[in-house]
Amino acid sequence: MSRGPKLSDVAAAAKVHQSTASRALDPNLSRRLSPEVVERVRRIADELGYSRNAIAASLRMQRSRMVGVIVPDLTNTMFPPMFRGIEDRLSTEGYSAILANSDFRPAKERSIIDTYLDRRLDGMILASAHLEDAEQLEALARKVPVVLMNREIADASVTAVIGDDAGGISEMFAHLAGLGHERIAHIAGPQDTSTGVARRDAFLAAARKAARGFDGRLLVAAETYSEREGYRCARHLLEAGGGPTAILAANDWLAIGCLTAIEEAGLNCPQDISVTGFNDMPFADRMRPPLTTIRIPHYRMGFEAADHLLALIAAPETTPTRVVMPPALIVRGSTAQRGG
Amino acid sequence: MSRGPKLSDVAAAAKVHQSTASRALDPNLSRRLSPEVVERVRRIADELGYSRNAIAASLRMQRSRMVGVIVPDLTNTMFPPMFRGIEDRLSTEGYSAILANSDFRPAKERSIIDTYLDRRLDGMILASAHLEDAEQLEALARKVPVVLMNREIADASVTAVIGDDAGGISEMFAHLAGLGHERIAHIAGPQDTSTGVARRDAFLAAARKAARGFDGRLLVAAETYSEREGYRCARHLLEAGGGPTAILAANDWLAIGCLTAIEEAGLNCPQDISVTGFNDMPFADRMRPPLTTIRIPHYRMGFEAADHLLALIAAPETTPTRVVMPPALIVRGSTAQRGG
DNA sequence: AAGGATCGTGCAATCGAATGCACTTGCTGT
DNA sequence: ACAGCAAGTGCATTCGATTGCACGATCCTT
């Protein structure tokens, strides 16, 4: 556990000055040195098992080559592919990623951010939904490069990489309409999340465009993105008298809850009623019936987020961007021609 | 993006020496200072928006309060809960975790480890299965505190936190035997993984204990832990003539593949044949039928791994431990009394 | 009242690498 | 033969926080 050799040890062993050793080990600067010296220093560094102290370098260089990532809950299947995308982009530039979960708690998020600031990370990717205050977020973005992932703030003053909620919902609505459905219900997500609101608005826009009026009985909002809530809302829709022939749920969990409620009611999906989800989570294809849903390219979102963060690190004054990832309609067994 | 105030700025504003300011901001040392000074320094630090430079502190203290985690693939549902356990344990001590995926590639793992060493992380948790060479691993463990998670090496010379494969399998075997099954087949996992081998050995031990001979037709090994392989192996078992009334698969994916094969063969699970998995992954309860399986406490494994790592960091010369996490039998619909 | 203990604070030396500047070579050109 | 130049290398400072040591002041003890 003893401290290994440092640069000056390598330099001494190679009979050159530290600064020369430093340059010899840096591929960019080693061109200015004589080949023999470079060769010798490198060989000796190897022999000694020298490992560059990145901490000392960070202090001197004022950059840590690390970025912080905050997600609300890593066990949500959306996030692992996102993180992989982030890591894959970052690693090509020699960056590492620190990861933490906020558990949807603003206080926890705040404290994670504070440790990240202390650690002088070069940037942060926030997928955590809170830190409600847009002002706080902007203040943060003024101190350190920040990219939002899977969420955004109102005036787009912070770079954000998001899924195209509106596009996905309207594509799904068109799919159902194309199958002859006219009474399409919506189970909205929690209305205190940006996705819940965006998807509901997109649904209402599509519904109003398709027909004159919209029957209010065809809309319910869930309180959380959970199977339980999907079940509850579906029962509500079935009993409300709106006579839906299709249910467009705001995400896959809600849709799965629907399936249970429909089965319990003695109905059959998709013969009697079609159901759709959103996200295409793992196993969506293994439900009974397999779920028709919208796929959001999570890996690519992470990759893009990291890419934009790196750009921001390189040029901090760049104007914020809003990157929208294209959704894809995945048609499976849970939707069918109306009437079956 | 300008550099914020440093300790000496705070000190100057509070009209004290840096060292005094440093002590005032450290809860342990501030007791030795006069309350007024402590109060004043803290207030001024707040007013100035001072943020302690953790990099400089790390350099001086020779500890980074960061640990590195390597998993083969974060999108495998086992790992997110483990990581949460790790983070939850670490965060109480002010530690952060860097995460990276090795993709089962030893070269990638090696290069991740090298960056971790350069960054002078205080310790590492390795859930990546490779770095085959036990010697390399021991050499690494001599340089830096290391805890293995979900794997171990032969002579237990590195601390490891693992699931009780043998215990889980024998408990499952007993469950099936208790239901009257006598011809129990096993779909083993890949034999180049420690879990694949451990589970197969445990199965064979249980089978041999239960009956005199063991019918070789009741054993197949999958090449990967995948649904495809589960399907292939199950077909093989059904055609081999061993007449299994139950299939004990080495993990949930393999079991799910079995379900498909059984259905295709016109048989019914569990009436005609029982199937069991291992891991209790998310959605195991949503299969048709819901899967009887063994639950491994992944969150707790992560928590324990982090706990042991912290202990190792505090006292590097501690002798390696082998921590075995207890499995739990989760009985669901995929197992039934023999003969329905 | 003098010596000693205690308390609060300042001084200055680390930690390890990067780098602007200056210096020594050796070579070219006139 | 010497100015001029370039290539290669060394020197010394810097990044920001921590901490052993020392010093002065205050208080206690006998």
Image: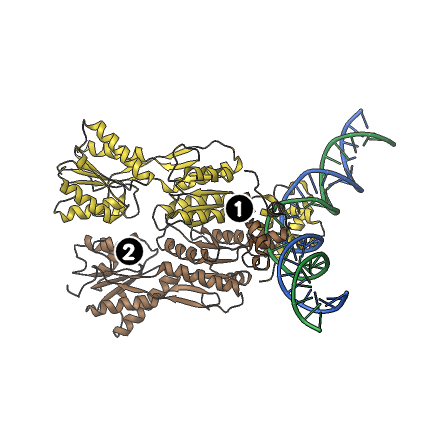
Chain colours: A brown, B yellow, C green, D blue
* Helix, strand or loop under label 2: helix
* Residue B30 percent across, percent down from the top left: 64, 43
For disc 2, the neighbor class at 10 Å (few under 14, some 14 to 19, many from 20) is many
Residue nearer the viewer, A37 or A317: A37
| B292 is higher (above) or lower (below) than A254 | above
Label 1: chain letter = A
| B131 is higher (above) or lower (below) than A128 | above
For disc 1, the neighbor class at 10 Å (few under 14, some 14 to 19, many from 20) is few
Same chain for the residues under marks 1 and 2 in the image: yes
Residue corresponding to mark 1: A46
User: The residue under label 1 is which amino acid type?
Assistant: Asp
Label 2: chain letter = A
* Residue A276 percent across, percent down from the top left: 25, 61
Q: Is residue B49 left or right of residue B282?
A: right
Residue nearer the viewer, B330 or B147: B147
Closer to the observer: label 1 or label 2? 1
Task: Pick the quarter of the image with the N terminus of chain B.
Answer: bottom right
Residue nearer the viewer, C23 or A222: C23
* Helix, strand or loop under label 1: helix
Task: Pick the quarter of the image with the C terminus of chain B.
Answer: top left
Residue corresponding to mark 2: A230
